[in-house]
Every structure is written in C-alpha cells, then in structure tokens.
Amino acid sequence: MISLIPRNLTDLASFAQIAQTIVVVVGFLYGKRQLDELVKSRHLEAVRELIKELGTPEIREIRTWLMRAPREHTGSGPRHAPTAQDIEKVRKLAVAYDRIGLLVSLGIVPEKHLYAFQKDEVRQLWGECRPFIEHIRRTEHRPGYCAHFEYLGDSWLRKLEGAADPLLRRVLRLRRSPRDGAKPTVRGQ
C-alpha cells in the first residue's frame, strides 16, 4: 500500500517534485488563459477602432452616396472629369478604408471576422472608388495613394476567398425546417 506520509528525505523530495510539477502546469494553464484574454482584448479594441472608423456619420453618408450614385464613373475610369466635391468625398471614404487595410496588413484586425462582416462592402466600394483613386494617383503624382485600400479590395479578398466557406458555415448555421427546407439563419436566433 502506498503511504502519503513521507518516511525519509527521498520520499519528501519526490512529493516536493510532484507538487512543483503541478504548480508549474497550473501556472502554465493560467498564463495561457491570460494570453488568450489579452489577444481577445486586443482584437476587441481593433474591432472597436474599425467600427469607429467606418461608422462615423460622414463616412456612412459618403458610402451611401457612392453606392447610390449614377454608375457613370465605373469601369476603366470616370467618363467625365470628376468634380472636386466628388473627389473629396471619395478621398475621405478611401482614407478610412486605407486605414482599415493598414490594420489588416499589420495583422491587428482579425481577418476572418472582418471578411465575414465587410467583404461585400469592401468589394463594392473598391470597385466604385478605384477610378477616383487612379485619377488622384495620376493627377497628384502619388502612385501609392490608398495602397492599403487597394490591397484590401483586391489581394486580401482573393486571399480569403478559399478560406471563407468554412468560416461562413460556422457563422451561419443551416437549420432544416420541415415546411421550408434548409434556410440560413444567424446563430442564436
């Protein structure tokens, strides 16, 4: 039978070593949990910054204007010279998305969540803003103007296209209903 009371110094040293191992493992698990919480906190702060950047009334108004504007400026470039007011509106929107692109390229914003949240909007807005940005690059001799927005609207979207399917399956759960077949619903509803 095993005795829990040490009979000599060797037994006491063995118990001390077991206790140290337990303390180290518990400390490691606690540290891992703290690190996970720190990462979540950092991501939360980045998402708050993203929402603050894109959610200002002015940016929302410009986004709405650009998405509802006549499509004469789409394609390879504006058919007519863009007005100074139009360029200024697009400049404000593009700079906001350029900042988001910078955060993404630095790995600060969690890409999969941004992709699930903004992929369609980024794609549409880049398509609408691109002719204006190219115009600004040409006329102001600034070839790198809004390069992070370009990355976001072009390379980043292509990079995440293949990874999106599993993510969207997790975000949207397919629930079967006998009367209306499979229909996507947001989790928790």
Image (cartoon, rainbow, N blue to C red):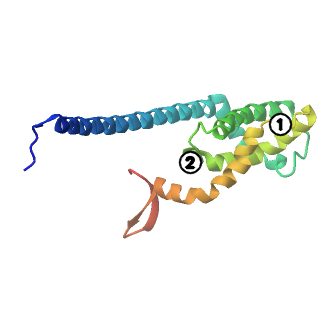
Instruction: Please tell me how crowded label 1 is: few (under 14), some (14-19), or many (20+) other residues with Cα within 10 Å.
Output: few
Q: Residues within 10 Å of mark 2 (few under 14, many from 20)?
A: some
Please tell me which residue lies in front, 152 or 127: 152
Element type at mark 1: loop
SS label for mark 2: helix
Residue at mark 1: 144
* Image quadrant assignment for residue 89: top right
Point 49% across, 59% down: residue = 169
- In the picture provided, is 2 more to the left or to the right than 144? left
Q: Position of residue 10 (x, y in %)?
A: 19, 38
Residue 112 numbered mark, or none: 2
Q: Position of residue 99 (x, y in %)?
A: 68, 33
Position of 36 with respect to 74 (left or right) is left
From the top left corner, tell me how far across and down residue 170 is, in percent: 46, 55
Q: Is residue 84 left or right of residue 112?
A: right
Q: CA distance from mark 1 to mark 2?
A: 26 Å
Residue in front for this viewpoint, 115 or 181: 115
**Residue type for callout 1:** Gly
Amino acid found under the numbered disc labelled 2: Lys
Q: Residue at x 56, y 49 (%)?
A: 116
Quarter of the image where one finds residue 3: top left
